[in-house]
Image (cartoon, helix red, strand yellow):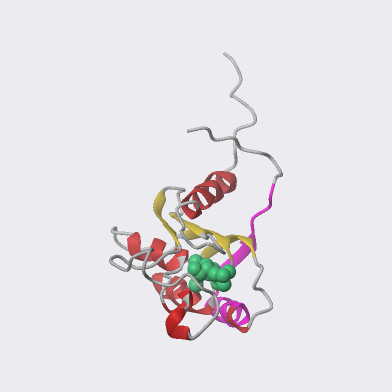
Amino acid sequence: MSDKRSGYISWDEYFMGVAVLSGMRSKDPHTQVGACIVSEDNKILSMGYNGFPKGCSDDEFPWAREGEPYDNKYFYTTHSELNAILNYRGGSLEGAKLYVTLFPCNECAKAIIQAGIRTIVYDDDKYEMTPSVMASKRMLDAAGVRYYRYKRTGREIQITL
Ligand SMILES: Nc1nc(=O)n([C@H]2C[C@H](O)[C@@H](COP(=O)(O)O)O2)cc1CO
Ligand SMILES: [Zn+2]
């Protein structure tokens, strides 16, 4: 009886890999974010990436980061976490785990808490010093939602399609 294969990727590598792959669909020229929601028994429930809502053309709505709020992207981009929550057509997300490539903002934190997601695994936290992320962590802590940083293995995972 041969021993099982070694070197297979961990659950966290698998699901963070799905989140990274989802982010590759983002048309945001500056920051591409991907999310993957997983059940407590490691079933993938939903995925999402940041972009404009259905019907709001990627070629007509603004991708600018500066200028009047009406003319930059922030009013219009749906964040990857919210897209993953809204893309889920099943029942409840109670107790689910969210893998996301960038730490959730305060708006997404509210949606995450209200959806019943209990754990967040994040990769980058480049906005950690912003009021948005500080408020996000304040609510997540108050709501008892656990979050931890994805432990990068440094392993290159090759995907050739
Ligand atoms: N956690 C997040 N998930 C997201 O999907 N986003 C989206 C909103 C914008 O489309 C983009 C951030 O643009 P920028 O400020 O890095 O140029 O990523 C942003 C954050 C940060 O809170
Ligand atoms: Zn957000």
Would you say residue 35 sits in the magenta stretch? no
**Residue 51 locus on image (x, y percent):** 42, 64
Q: Residue at x 52, y 83 (%)?
A: 67
**Residue 129 vertical position relative to residue 102 in the rendered view, above or below:** below
**Residue 15 vertical position relative to residue 66 in the rendered view, above or below:** above
Q: Which residue is drawn at 55% across and 76% down?
A: 140
Q: Report the side of 6 relative to 85 (left or right).
A: right
**Residue 106 vertical position relative to residue 81 in the rendered view, above or below:** below
**Residue 156 locus on image (x, y percent):** 66, 39
Q: Which residue is drawn at 52% across and 60% down?
A: 33
**Residue 126 locus on image (x, y percent):** 66, 68
Residue 56 or residue 154, whichever sits in front: 56
Residue 157 or residue 24, whichever sits in front: 24
**Can the viewer see residue 104 in this picture?**
no
Q: Residue at x 64, y 55 (%)?
A: 150
Q: Report the side of 156 relative to 14 (left or right).
A: right
Would you say residue 144 sits in the magenta stretch? yes
**Residue 151 locus on image (x, y percent):** 68, 52
Magenta part of the chain: 133-152
Residue at the outermost right position: 154
